[in-house]
Image (cartoon, helix red, strand yellow):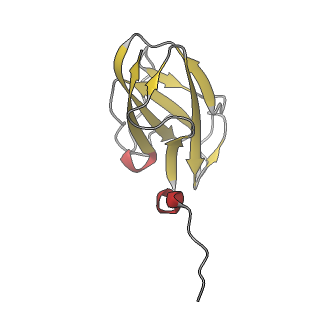
């Protein structure tokens, strides 16, 4: 009974958002290229609320947004309302957290289950 080996990442293949090119604890240089992935929903531009669809938000040095709450729009909450899945971000040297938050077309958060936070150090 020769089973093919499962890739190590198979356990992490659940629905949600993830950083494609960064992992928790990475040391990076500014500006930081960030690639955002979504599994289990479809990325689309903001504007309408469509079931199973939405767009990314990146929260710098903050936490996820509670389910149903509007993701704020300020210097630390970056909206990708055109449906973008990557960006280049200028960060000051030192430690930062990056939280990816998926939300519907009206920027209403899908909650903690649709967020992912990592810590990075900018050298």
Give x and y (percent) for residue 108: 46, 38
**Residue, x 40% and y 43% (percent of image)?**
68
Residue 82: give x, y in percent of width and height: 66, 28
Residue closest to the far bottom: 1
- The residue drawn where x is 46% and y is 38% is 23
Indicate the quadrant containing the N terminus: top left, top right, bottom left or bottom right.
bottom right
Q: Position of residue 13 (x, y in %)?
A: 52, 58
Q: Is residue 95 above or below residue 105?
A: above
Instruction: Determine the residue located farthest toward the front in the rendered image.
Output: 2
Quadrant for residue 120, please give it: top left
Locate residue 14, reporting x and y percent.
Answer: 50, 59
Q: Residue at x 62, y 29 (%)?
A: 86
Q: Which quadrant is home to the C terminus?
A: top left
Above-or-below relation of 59 to 56: above
Residue 119, image quadrant: top left
Which of 56 and 108 lies nearest the eye of the viewer? 56
Residue in the picture at 42% in, 42% down: 115
Number of numbered discs on residues: 0
Q: Nearer the viewer, residue 1 or 56?
A: 1
């Amino acid at each position: 009974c020769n089973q093919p080996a499962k890739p190590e990442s198979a356990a992490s293949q659940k629905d949600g958002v993830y950083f494609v090119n960064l992992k928790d604890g990475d040391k990076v240089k500014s500006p930081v290229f960030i690639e955002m992935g979504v599994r289990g929903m479809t990325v689309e531009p903001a504007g309408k609320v469509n079931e199973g669809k939405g767009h990314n938000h990146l929260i710098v040095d903050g936490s996820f947004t509670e389910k149903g709450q509007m993701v704020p729009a300020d210097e630390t909450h970056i909206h990708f309302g055109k449906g973008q899945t990557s960006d280049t971000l200028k960060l000051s040297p030192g430690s930062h957290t990056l939280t990816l938050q998926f939300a519907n077309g009206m920027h209403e958060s899908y909650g903690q289950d649709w967020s992912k936070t990592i810590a990075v150090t900018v050298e």
